[in-house]
Each structure stands twice: as structure tokens, then as C-alpha cells.
Image: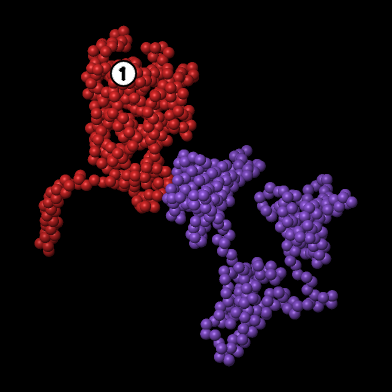
Chain colours: A purple, B red
Amino acid sequence: MAANCARVVGSLFGKSVNFASSTRPVTLQFCRQICGTPALRRKNLGPTVPETFTAEFIQKQVEEFEIGKRHLANMMGEDPENFTQEDIDRSIAYLFPSGLFEKRARPLMKHPVEIFPKQRAVQWGPDGRPFHFLFYTGKQAYYSLMHDLYGRVLKVEKHQDQLRAKGLFPTEPKQIALGPSRWLTKEEMEALLVEPISRQDYEHFIQLMERLLAMPCCSLEQQFVMSHRQQLEAQSMHQVVPPLQKDDAGVDFSTAEGRRKSSRGSVVVRDCGAGRLTVNGQDHLHYFPVLQDREQLMFPLQFCGLLGRFDLDCSVSGGGRSSQAGALRLAISRALLSFLSQSEGEAMRQAGLLTPDPRVRERKKPGQEGARRKFTWKKR
Amino acid sequence: MSLHRLAFRLRPTVTRVRSLHSSGFVQQQEAVAVEPEPESLSVFRTHEKDPACHSDKHVGQFYTLSSAHVRPLFPDSLPWRYQQQMKTFNETCIMVRQPALEVISYLKKADYSQPALRYVFYGLKGTGKTMSLCHTLHFCYTQGWLVLHVPDAHLWVKNCKELLPSSYKSSRFDQPLQATTWLRNFKITNEPFLSKIKLKERYVWTKRESTEAGSSLGELVDQGISRIKSSSDVVGAVMKELRLQSGQPGADFRLAVAVDGVNALWGRSTIKKGDKTAVDPEELTLVYNLRKLMKNDWSGGAVITTLSQTGSLYHPKSAYLPQDLLGERGFDNMDPFIPVSVPNYSEKEFESCYLYYMDRNWLQHPQSRTAEGKKELIFLCNMNPSMFERLCGHL
């Protein structure tokens, strides 16, 4: 029984876990020819056509995914009924740990709808007659959208005429609250309609939408308009502000951490009013003899104009002198956020004080002397 | 037309004549104006030029040393950066600070019939130990003492270009270059005493040369400067004579021995013998004789020293306490001594130094003159005098 389960799991698992971001499902059984390379065997078939998947195939994949999900939940000892996508991701990361930097190259197990690109179902019936009345235009989704949009424009105009006839035409047109949003890009429209759109078609669509928005009574079609707009989230809403704590003496303080390259630093910022700095128990002048490092530490405080106000107690480890200074700078900026208002925090973010520096040491590649440096080229 | 041109040519000369007259008036006015100026005191300066009169109320203020004192007292023995500052600002100003005042007060009250007291300035790097030593030395000089100043004892235990085996004792080594330099500086500093002090013993240098008892110190020093080979022994002889004579009832001078970087005498040296073995500082004539002076078996004077990590060999950068830098041997030799800690600038002293640089127009950067800039400077240098000076050098 257990052996059966294991075998079933193995085969099902092999098909539901995808190791590549491409749309081709990878089977774990390979048949290799002993001699010859794939390049020799591949015949030139002309330009490759994107693969199409039949609806039955997709449905089979969905069933396999569901069963595989239940097996995975059993393996991890969790409840198969309430196994969410985050649980799946966590379990896969645990069972198949990968050190690859590119997140998209790591093993993933997602619902086939997210993996296989959306394809249009068959557009005609068994008698060969197409379902949609605009099929023979060639761009049926686009033209139907334009048709629908123009119909709404006419409806709004008719509503306006009715109001004008009754004498209730609003003098101040009620604008749609668009909020921080933008129109969907051409790529997003193509994904929405599951159909390629040309640049001119897209521009016509946007022009007609703008015309709809320009009308006074366009609030009737708010939902339709918003479905074609993308909300923009303000960057600053992502910032996590460390909480402001009070210690025994009644002094406000806050703690924060920062990292840079391989250094990890943490800072306790106290609202004493002395302006002293201690790094790893030593004076900051002694720990950072180089002026550049001390300037890095000073930058957040100087930017906010709070130089003599705070007492800083820093601890840092790992990395070199410059990366330790950078880690501490980030930690200080984050700790200061709890003492500042929203707008000042936004100013810090725009100054780049709150952005962790993503630069890491690039690996050395084989065949080269370093990450970029090649061996000395000799002509002969 | 020509008349017009003449008139034009004449006009500038007329104006020039007028300006000559007016400048004369202006000069007279300026001469009148100059006199009341010295009476207006600035906050960071004091007009008290005599270190003996400095007291607690002068702490944090700069006093100017007269050039008549500076050239003989410090022929080459001030810190290099300070010498450059002297040249730039065209004056020698030292800040009156608490450690130096303390030692000066002890020197005033000490009993000179007792064995010599030893004072040691210690502190973190760049806090002003050497400058405190110079301030104290200036006091001794103005009081008419004989000043025996070793600017940096570390220079005697490292980077020695010439090392001769001693003629006096075969196990020791001579350093002729360093000895001659020191004798020259000694001569410049103590001109008046050279003819007054007479030698008590006879010193034989070679078969033909000897210095008789009863001849003046000046002759001995000249002997050392001219005969380079025996200069280290001359240094030893000078030290011995001064040590013997200073406590005597007949002597009318007091001896101030000032050594900067005294921890070099008991540390290690980087000098190597011919066979690549390291030379112990004890085997160097200069160091041996200086160590004898450091003992408190003589009276009638004082020993003022500083510890220095900057030039020291084989000491970590974090060491600044006497126990760390002197080592066991040095501590036992120097014990008992009076340790004087030299801290970083206080708020008042920092303010004073900042105003001094502003007054000398040393801070050119517009941001450095604002209150914000001052806060930045405080943060970056953390009230350390030498760091502050280096920072301001960039501005």
C-alpha cells in the first residue's frame, strides 16, 4: 500500500511539478540516444509556432494538479482540504531547496491556469459556423469591445439629452474618481482580450475611452471604465515603520536593522539629546577611522536635521568597513522613521536612504579570471 | 579739441593728488583707530602671555607665544601639523587646557629639594598630549629653567640609518645622527646656560681629545656637534652632568626633562644589528642614558612626559593607558608617577577652537560657518582636537 502510494506520488509528482518557466511540461523520463547530439538530430522545420493546448489537456492538467496538491498536503502532514497556494509554495521550497538567484528558475507548483497561457476556445460549432457575429473581422474581441464602448457612449449621450430636456442638466459635471490609476497597457489589454492588438487599434481604444471620460455624465459607466484601469500603489505605503518604545527612564527609543553585502547591523536610537555614538562598544571615531564611513553614518541625521538630538547605540558584524557603514546607515534611517512624520519619511525614501542596496558580489565564472575579467588574450 | 584732450589728461592726475592727500588723512585716522583695538577682547583669546599667570578662568582660551620664545624653545620639536599651522596663521597660539594647568600648578608648588616628580600625560590619540607638554615647557622656559626636551623618543628606536658600536661600552650602540640633531637643538634652546654651567668631571673622547673638568657645558656640546662619532657619548655626559648638578645647593637652575613618547624607552625597537637580530632599546646609548634621567634619584627639577601610541611599535591602536603602553618594565621604572589624563575637547573648548579658525579665516566653506555645519563637524570629529583640525583643513 505504501509502495503503491509512493509510486503514484512519484509519477503524479513528476508531472505536476514544473521545473521551468516555459510552457512545456517536463517529464522525468528521458530517452537518450547514445551517440549524436540533439543539435544534429534536430531538423530545420521552419519558424516555430507557439504550442496550442486542447481544452481536454488543460482539464487533465487541472485534475492532476488537484490530486498532486492533496498528496503534497498528506506528505507535509497538513490538512488536504485547506491547503492554500502559499502552503504549496512553502512545501515545495522545503522539499526542493534551490540556491538559484533567479526566482523564476526555481521549482514551482502552480495551478495550470497560471502556467499555461490563456487560449481561446474553438470559435465555431460542429457545423463550421462561428459563434461570434464579428468573427470574420479577424479581431472579434477588439471590435466587440469597441462596439460595446461606443454603445455606452451613445447611452450616456442619450441620458444627457434626457436630463437637458428635463432641465436637470448638472452645471458642475460629476467626475469619476479615478484615483491613482493609469490605463491598461497594450500588453495588459492583449492579455485581457486573449487576442493580439495593433498599436493603432490600442490608440483608438484609448481615444474613445478619453472621449467617454470627457462627457459630463460619464459616472454612469464608472465600473466599466475602472475595469480597464490599473491602480497605482504609492511606494511609501510599503514602508514598515518600527514602533516607538519607551524604556524605564521614560526615554523614547526605537530599534531597527539594516544590511549591506554581507554586513548585518542593528541600531537603537534614543531620544536623549546628547549626540553620542557607540559602535560595538567603541567610540565611532575609533571604530571608523575613515571619514567616508562616518559621513555615511551622519547622512540620515543630517538630512532630517536631527544631528545633536539622538543617542545611537550600534552593533554591526560581517563584511568590510564600507559595507558595515552602509548597513548602519540603513538601520539608522529605518529607526528614525518612527520619530518622523509621514512626509519626512517620504522625503527620506526619495533620497534613497531607505532602499537596501541590492549589489552583491558577483560570482566568478569558469573560463574567466574573475567575475568580468577575462584571461589575458594571447594572439598565438 | 586739443584743449579738451589736455583737460582729460590733467583730470586723472588731479584726482591722484587728491587721493594722496586723503590717504594721508586716512592713515592718520587708522593710526588713531589701531590703538583702541587691543582693548577689545575676543571670547576665545586671552592676552595673558605668561603661562605662570594662566588660571582656571583662562581655560579654553588661546594665548599667543611670542616669537622670541618660540624659536629657541621649539627649534624643531613641535608636531608637524602644528608647525604648518603656525606658518599659515603667522602666529603661535596654544589653547589653555585643564591638564596643562594642573601640571603647572604642581610645578609651582613642588618642593625641589625632594627627588624629582614625574608627570605623565596620557590619553586617546589626538587629544592634545604633546601640546600640553609644550605648554608646560613654555612655562618652565619663562621661569628660567633648563629645558632638556626630547621631541619624540620613538625616533631614537626606529628608522636608524647609521648604527655604530659604542666606543665606551662594546655591547652598546651609538646613533650619531640623532645625537647630533638633539645636541644642536639643545644648544639653541639653552644658550644662556651653556656658559654658566661648569663640568665637574673630566671626559676623555680619544687619545688626543678630552674635555677637562671646569670647562663650560657649551664646550662639551660643541665637542659633540663637531665630532659626530662621539656625539652619543656627549649626550650621555651632558645628561649625567645635569643630573648631578641640578640638585646641588650651589646650582641656580632647575632642570625640566621633557620626553614625548616615553613608552618608546621600554618598548621594542625595529633597528637590527648586522646579523639581523633585533636591538634591545637598552643597548642604545641614547636610550640607556635617558632612562637614567627618568629615575627619580635626582632632585631640583621635574620630569614631564607623554605616552604616545602613534609612533609606537608593536602596540595596538586601542592602547592608551599607561599600563598598556609602558609595559611591565616601563611601569616599574616610572612608578611612582603622576598620571594626567588629557581628554577630548569640552563644549567650551570646541567652541573656542571653532571661533579661532573662523577668526583666522580657515573655514572657507560657506556651510561650515552655519550652525548646521557646526553640528556636522561635531559629529564627524567627536570633539577630538586632531580630527577637528584635519577636517577643517579640508574646508
Q: Which residue is mark 1?
A: B243
Q: Nearer the viewer, residue A14 or B60?
A: B60
At 51% across and 40% down in the image, what residue appears? A281
Task: Examine the image and state in which quarter residue B35 appears.
Answer: top left
Nearer to the camera, A371 or A351: A351
Residue A116 figure quarter: bottom right
Which residue is depicted at the point 67% across and 53% down?
Answer: A103
The answer for which chain carries disc 1 is B
Residue reaching furthest to the top: B207
Residue drawn 35% across the image and 20% down it: B296
In which quadrant will I find the N terminus of chain B?
bottom left
Point out residue B54 in the picture as x, y percentages from the top left corner.
27, 36
Residue B218 appears at what percent x and percent y? Answer: 25, 19
When the figure is inspected, residue A282 is found, relative to residue B279, above or below; the finding is below
Indicate whether B250 appears above or below A35.
Answer: above
Where does the image place residue B276, in percent across and percent down from the top left?
49, 19
**Mark 1: few, some, or many residues within 10 Å (few <14, many ≥20)?**
many
- What element does badge 1 sit on? helix
| Residue A188 seen in this snapshot | yes
Residue A348 visible in image? no
Q: Which of B125/A141 is in front?
A: B125
Give the x, y percent position of residue A208.
61, 78
